Image (cartoon, rainbow, N blue to C red):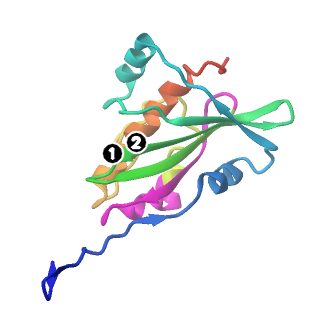
Amino acid sequence: MTVAGALVPLASRAAEYLSVEAAQRAAFPAATAFVPVASVLDAEARRRIAQVAQPPGARDPRWWRAVDGSNTLGWFAVDAVIGKQEYITYSLALDPAGKIIRLDVLEYRETHGYEIRGERWRAQFVGKSRTDSVTLNGDIANISGATLSCRHVTDGVRRLLAFHALLPSVS
């Protein structure tokens, strides 16, 4: 849009809802530290992830091990998926067995579909693990008007569950 010859950007709903640190604390309030986990995957590991997580991601998520002293409380990942045109940054917290304990939307940049931030939609993921299908319109309900956001975050969660099993420090 132009106003008196100047370009004026259209308004968007881009917002940062939680920092990585705030999401980590919300997921693991008893953690004394969040230890970064190196995720060096070979071609075979990437092929295995791509088999269960379509479409495969373009980049590796960041992972941390949530600890209380020497005890592992769980795993925490931050990833980004494309919404319709912009990235959605989200976090996933897993218990030591690899079951989802929390999903948070950290940053949302799209003008539509922000309803995925709602607790009711995010709660559908709690308790899921890599043995569950985690599919939109299967065990995860869609939100009308937010279909692409719902689909891509669901695909991203499925990818993170597959990725988690291949982390070097996961037993």
List the residue tagged with mark 1: 151
Disc sitting over residue 57 in the figure: none
How far apart in space, not on screen, are marks 2 and 1 (Cα)? 5 Å
List the residue tagged with mark 2: 154
**Quadrant in which the C terminus appears:** top right
Question: Mark 2, residues whose alpha carbon is within 10 Å: few (<14), some, or many (≥20)?
Answer: many
Q: Secondary structure at mark 1?
A: helix
- x, y percent for residue 149: 34, 52
**Quadrant in which the N terminus appears:** bottom left
Labels 2 and 1 touching (C-beta < 8 A): yes
- x, y percent for residue 128: 54, 36
Q: Secondary structure at mark 2?
A: helix
Question: Mark 1, residues whose alpha carbon is within 10 Å: few (<14), some, or many (≥20)?
Answer: many
- Amino acid at circle 2: Thr
Residue sitting at the far front: 5
Residue sitting at the far top: 44
Relative to 32, 22 lies left or right: left
**Rendering quarter of residue 68:** top right
Q: Residue at (68%, 54%) from the top-left corner?
A: 26
Q: Residue at (63%, 53%) from the top-left corner?
A: 23
Q: Residue at (33%, 61%) from the top-left corner?
A: 110
**Rendering quarter of residue 64:** top right
Q: Which residues are magenta?
A: 96-121
Magenta segment includes 70: no
**Picture layout, residue 98 above or below residue 76:** above
Relative to 32, 11 lies left or right: left
Q: Residue at (48%, 30%) from the top-left corner?
A: 132
**Picture layout, residue 109 above or below residue 36:** below
